[in-house]
Amino acid sequence: MPSIADVLDSLVLRGALAPAEAAPDLLIEIAHGATRTRDFDALAARLTSPLPASLVDFFHVNTDAGAPELALEIGRRFVDLEPTRTVEILRCRIPRTFIDCNRRLDASREDLAAGKVTPGLMPWITTDEDRALLRDCYDRYVAAVRAAVGRLSPSGAMLLLHSYAPRTVDVQVDLQIVESLRRAYQPDVEPTWPLRPEIDVIGRDPEGVSHAPAAVVESLRRELGALGIGVADSATYPMHSSTLAFEHAMRMPGRALCLEVRRDLLADPFEPFAEMHIGAEKVARLAGPLATALRAWFDA
């Protein structure tokens, strides 16, 4: 799949023995892959809505820093382990600060609250021109991902990769979001927020039914457990129908895995209000066990 400027970066990695035109066996999606300040600045410059001051601070807190780097290293290691296979990596370049490409835009406030997730279209987007621009970007991205899922090999699988801030900071996503976050991250306040799991498999729906691939999760626990890294089971939030991850999980029963990786395991160091440096050694430490665990999908 070709990349789409300012919407989607696509990269195909082939194992040494993989046929040149083979359909991908593994699709890795980074729905919140706009992690660079320039991603925010480029889209903000096209908008006409009055944006909250210093909104870039929210962008850095809320985007999935480290997930693109981890996805790339997982892909490389996977095709080294599985030289006959092909991996496609899709990285969204649309900042979720404006529109979230892992949300159903028709989800109600009640749905979003039940899923413990932020809105699809943010409240500071107030002009029709901006809504049309962002919806067009969203539609092109979502269509491209759905098409990529449709091109997977018959035994293909999908990793939905995310990273999240180390602590659950409970603030309202409204026009005062930056001020609220600044207060929440004060040195004497931040440690009072609940610490999130190092890795969380987002697989259980609100009724408690798991849609995660059991063999892959078992392998993941074994591989990461050897490093002293814990793997939780939907401890942070559920696999909810207000997200597009839910759509993929329903479309590919047992062949889709949604993961949250705690950002301090990737960032060097974790800095909530800045573009983070992602540590190569930290990425490598996680990528090997993750790539090994994903092989459970393809074991005979």
Image: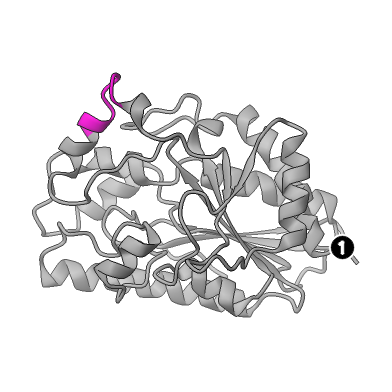
* Quarter of the figure with residue 184: top left
Q: Is residue 88 visible?
A: yes
Q: Residue at x 60, y 43 (%)?
A: 70
Residue drawn at (73%, 76%) of the image: 153
Type of secondary structure dominating the magenta stretch: loop
Q: Give the x, y percent position of residue 113.
A: 31, 61
Q: Nearer the viewer, residue 157 or 204?
A: 204
Q: Is residue 163 left or right of residue 189?
A: right
Residue 37 seen in render: no
Q: Which residues are magenta?
A: 182-189
Residue beneath the point at 47% across and 29% down: 277
Nearer to the camera, 259 or 134: 259
Where 176 sits versus 269, above or below?
below
| Occupied quadrant, residue 73 | top right
Q: Is residue 186 magenta?
A: yes
Is residue 290 or residue 186 the one in the foreground? 186
**Quadrant of the snapshot with the N terminus:** bottom right
State yes or no: residue 180 in magenta.
Answer: no
- The crowding category of the residue bearing disc 1, from other C-alpha atoms within 10 Å (few below 14, some 14 to 19, many at least 20), is few
Q: Look at mark 1 in the image and give the residue it sits on.
A: 299
Q: Position of residue 272 (x, y in %)?
A: 35, 32
Instruction: Indicate the amino acid at tag 1.
Output: Asp
Quadrant of the snapshot with the C terminus: bottom right
For the point 68% across and 75% down, which residue is it?
152
- Farthest residue in the front direction? 207
Report the number of discs: 1
Residue 227 percent coordinates (x, y): 73, 31
